[in-house]
Amino acid sequence: QVQLVESGGGLVQPGGSLRLSCAASGFSFEDYAIGWFRGAPGKERERLTCITPFDDSTFYEDSVKGRFTISSDSSKNTIYLRMEHLRLEDTAVYYCAAGYPPGVCVESMFGDDAMNYWGKGTLVTVSS
C-alpha cells in the first residue's frame, strides 16, 4: 500500500524556520520524483519544489527559491523541506506527492497532473 505521510507542521513566527518531513512507503522511492505543494484557503494548490532521489536533482518554484530547501534520505525513504525566513503568506497545508517517471521533476512538467500519489498534508501557520 502506497503511503506518503507528512509531518513537522505547526505554528511559527514570521522570519522563523521549520522542517517538514515526508515518509514514503509502498513504492520504489528512487524510481519517482517527490515534490512539495501547498494549498492555502481561497487559493489554488501551488507547486513548490521537487527532487529525484536517485540523483538528487531538484527544481524550485521562484516563489520559494532561496528560502526553501528540499533534500532526500534514501536510507529512510524520506524527503525533507527546510523552510526559512517564513512569511505570513507561507501559511498553508503542505502536501508531498510522488510522480512517475522521475523526469517529471523539471519546470515544464512538475505539477498536480504529474503526480501519482499524495499525502494528506501538514498545516503550517505563520503568525505572530
Image (spheres, helix red, strand yellow):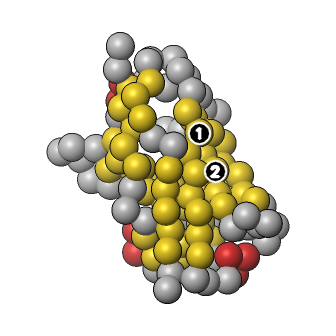
**Image coords of residue 109 (percent x, y):** 53, 70
Q: Quarter-wise, where is residue 127 in the image? A: top left
Q: Amino acid at mark 2?
A: Tyr
Say if 65 sits above or below 2 in the image.
Answer: above
- Residue at screen point 77% across, 66% down: 74
Q: Amino acid at mark 1?
A: Arg
**Image coords of residue 86 (percent x, y):** 49, 26
- Residue at screen point 73% across, 64% down: 76
Say if 99 sits above or below 83 in the image.
Answer: below
Q: Secondary structure at mark 1?
A: strand
Q: Which mark is residue 80?
A: 2
Label 2 vs 1, first from the N-terminus: 1
- Residue at screen point 51% across, 17% down: 15
Residues at marks 2 and 1 touching, judged by CB atoms closer than 8 Å: yes
Say if 122 sits above or below 32 in the image.
Answer: above
Which residue, given by chain and number where applicable, does mark 1 sit on?
A: 19
Q: Quarter-wise, where is residue 77 in the image? A: bottom right
